[in-house]
Image (cartoon, rainbow, N blue to C red):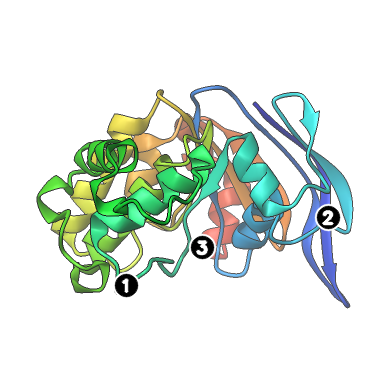
Amino acid sequence: MLRVRGLTKRFGGLLATDDLDLDIWVGELHALIGPNGAGKTTALAQIAGEILPTAGSIHFDGVDISRDSAPARVGRGLARTFQITQLLHTFTTEDNVALAVQIRCGHSFRFWADVHRDQTLRKPALEYLERVGLSSRAQALAGELSHGEQRQLEVAVALATKPRLLMLDEPLAGLGPAEAAEMVGLLRRLKGQIAILLIEHDMDAVFDLADRITVLTSGRRIAIGPPNEIQCNADVRAAYLGEE
């Protein structure tokens, strides 16, 4: 589904992404891990179209999207969440998802119609909230949700764009044990339904969920493989633990 070759990003003298190759298969949950500052979010931002690479190519479903804008990539079926949640805090939970449905459908504005009664927006919005376990919080303001619920809502908003590849940037960050378990359960339910590229520091969750893992350090890939191989990889252990 996704084929990245030679992805390179320089910020002046800083080499943030160093000749990265990455493949993600249909339905795969692929984790991208590495120490702090390894370049994981920068790589994801290039795949999402928020940062243009210095060199390299990105193909999605056989199409070169290397120079496409971020909205154009969403239209092709890529969606992402962020380390810091990006929500409309003064809108209800349902409204946040309904807006994503509206954008996906190219919904025309009808100025004399009550958008709150438009079932072409409301029905799917409630279905996505049900999918992530937030249906009981549909009328709560997004800003009143707990941190874990906001993480769940951001996934619902991303799903409402009907992605074929969902990119998640540290969805467990800042969550307590119960909220983390809820998010892991959600990711487990989504696994296999769509392709997922996961950046996460919780190694228990990564090794539990991932089909394959790519490890970065200093923007460079040092290992790729199934969880059992990554756990035993000497280069990976050295990158995390400083072992020789």
Between disc 1 and disc 2, the foreground one is: 1
| Residue 167 visible to the viewer | no
Query: Between 187 and 157, which is closer to the camera in this rendering?
Result: 157
Q: Where is residue 210 shown, x and y percent of the image?
A: 43, 35
**Residue placed furthest toward the front:** 112
Q: Are marks 3 and 2 in contact (CB under 8 Å)?
A: no
Classed neighbour count for the residue bearing mark 2: other residues with Cα under 10 Å, few (<14), some (14–19), many (≥20): many
Q: Which residue is mark 2?
A: 8
Q: Give the Cα separation between the discs numbered 3 and 2.
A: 26 Å
Q: Where is residue 79 shown, x and y percent of the image?
A: 53, 45
Residue shown at the point (51%, 50%) measured from the top left: 80
Q: Where is residue 113 shown, x and y percent of the image?
A: 33, 51
Secondary structure beneath dot 2 equals: strand
Secondary structure beneath dot 1 equals: loop
Residue shown at the point (18%, 44%) measured from the top left: 133
Between disc 3 and disc 1, the foreground one is: 1
Q: Earlier in the sequence, mark 1 or mark 2?
A: 2
Q: Earlier in the sequence, mark 3 or mark 1?
A: 1
Q: Give the Cα separation between the discs numbered 1 and 2.
A: 35 Å
Task: Kindly indicate the quadrant of the structure image that contains residue 88.
Answer: bottom left
Secondary structure beneath dot 3 equals: helix
Q: Which residue is mark 3?
A: 241
Q: Earlier in the sequence, mark 3 or mark 2?
A: 2
The tag on residue 192 is none
Query: Between 190 and 216, which is closer to the camera in this rendering?
Result: 190
Q: Give the Cα separation between the discs numbered 3 and 1.
A: 39 Å
Q: Where is residue 155 shown, x and y percent of the image?
A: 37, 49
The amino acid at mark 2 is Thr
Q: Quadrant of the N terminus?
A: top right
Q: Which residue is mark 1?
A: 89
Residue shown at the point (24%, 63%) measured from the top left: 92
Classed neighbour count for the residue bearing mark 1: other residues with Cα under 10 Å, few (<14), some (14–19), many (≥20): some
